[in-house]
Image (cartoon, grey):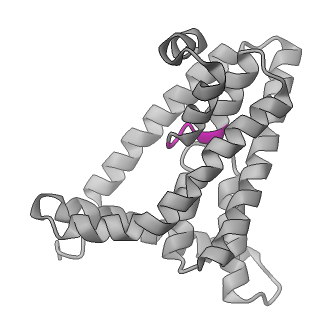
Amino acid sequence: MREFISQLIKNDTLATVIMSFIPLIELKGGIIFATGAGFSVIKAFFLAYVGSTLVFFPIFFLLVPILNLLKKIKVFNKFAIKVENYFKDKADQTLEQREAKTKRQFSQTLKKQLGTFIFVAIPLPMTGVWTGTAIAVFLGLKFKEAVLPVVLGNVVAGILICLLSIVCKAVGISLNLVLYILFALAFIMLIAFIVKVARKKGSTDN
């Protein structure tokens, strides 16, 4: 897998950044790829973090306008509504989980920020900056309220993946195998996302 990506892009530094920008792969794949390519853990973290964090800005500012535009196009209308409802449901679930686990009386904004931070910090497919930013948008967080939990959550996720890569190297587990597994999980999660969106009722379906 790593050799294929290296041959395809011809530049491991650029490949790391590009992989980190791709949904589902994101920071996780970037770090595993870079450390497997021989980069130091610090360099791998930096490159993957930059690529994955930059995603926040277009998603935060363009997600809703793009969905609104697609809803005006007949052929994309139902799909856009279902995607919007999917992320609204994820946002509601994130807030409900935070309220259930938070005993102290935090403000709603702080609960939303904490929920977004924890969601992004979990280094699994569908829990990175892409989905985390979408959740922040549909939680109604403003830019200055959303940016910190997302970027800090991404730091935590990056540290955990760096530790994973170090452990794998120490015990002799191939990082190329880990990359294969990550891509397989990303593919499975993508199929699951498509199925969930396809089965979800849009507001026009009622």
Rendered view: 89 above or below 163: below
Q: What residue is shown at x 18% (from left), y 59% (from top)?
A: 76
In the rendered image, is residue 196 in sight? yes
Query: Quadrant of the image for the C terminus?
Result: bottom left
State the image quarter where residue 198 is shown.
bottom left
State the image quarter where residue 38 is shown.
top right
Most common SS among magenta residues:
loop
Q: What residue is shown at x 59% (from left), y 80% (from top)?
A: 142
Please state if 190 lies on the left or on the right of 134 as rendered: left
Highlighted range, magenta: 23-27
Q: Residue placed farthest to the right in the image?
A: 170
Residue 49 lies, in percent from the top left, at 71, 43
What is the number of callouts on the image?
0
Rendered view: 86 above or below 102: above
Residue 146 lies, in percent from the top left, at 64, 71
Please state if 17 lies on the left or on the right of 164 as rendered: left
Q: Residue placed farthest to the left in the image?
A: 74
Q: Nearer the viewer, residue 28 or 56?
A: 56
Residue 203 drawn in magenta? no
